[in-house]
Amino acid sequence: MEISWYGSRCVRVQAKDGSLLIDPFDPKEVDLRAPSTSDDIVLVSSAVVSSDVIDRAGGAFIIKGPGEYERKGIAIRGMGAFQDSQNGSELGRCTIYKIIADEISLCHLGALGQEKLTPEQLETIGDPDILFIPAGGQGALDAKVAAEIANQIEPKIIIPIGFESSPDKFLKEIGLPAEKMESFKISPKQLPADRTMVVILTK
């Protein structure tokens, strides 16, 4: 499996039998270079998404909300969440995605803005190998809350996303060293067994 980050909350997961792109953005709305969208699956965590994003997805299987899905050997479960700490009254609802591909479990928290996860959400998320968490700046979570939620989930690997220029505030809050790389290649045998690893992906 190979994982790449394109800025904001946008992540690509290239698995053995297929690829998925999570939270692609409209380059007209965000000052970032958008990735090509030739993926098999596109996941959208926020209820509001530009029609241009959908148009660029081409023939991809598009998932925009809670439910259970499977395509190209990749299993996906979407669960409801809130984009703010007021039960969605300010920014509305969003979707957390749990993904299983290449015998690795991943969780993408999307546009999450809750100050903590509910017991039901934690039970559904389970024990993911890899967690993508918005870590302040562009996402709804600030660095302190992001670290607290990461500690709630206790994944093997944390990949912070959604930060503007630096993940330093998040790293200070989480208190773990980080490894930086352009893309992250991982197999089940390479997952850390007795420690939590933080990976910073560069755009």
Image (cartoon, rainbow, N blue to C red):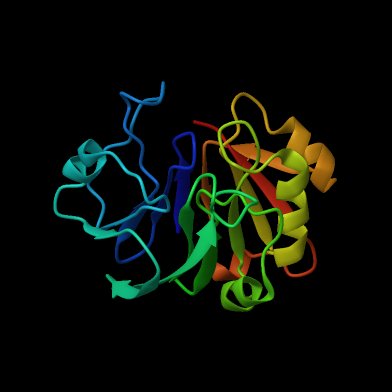
**Quarter of the image that includes the N terminus:** bottom left
* Figure check: 114 above or below 121: above
The one of 8 and 39 positioned closer to us in this rendering = 8
Residue located 69% across and 33% down the image? 167
**Rendered location of residue 28, percent (x, y):** 30, 23
In the rendered view, does 82 fall on the left or right side of 11?
A: right
| Residue placed most toward the observer, 167 or 63 | 63
Residue 58 visible in the shown view? yes
In this view of the protein, can residue 98 be seen by the observer?
no
Left or right of 41? Residue 123 is: right
The quadrant where residue 200 appears = top right
From the viewer's side, name the closer residue of 47 and 139.
47
Residue 79: percent from left, percent from top: 48, 69
Quadrant in the rendering for residue 157: bottom right
- Say if 29 sits above or below 15 in the image: above
Q: Residue at x 67, y 64 (%)?
A: 117
Tally the numbered discs. Answer: 0
- Most distant residue in the top direction: 31
Which picture quadrant has residue 144?
A: top right
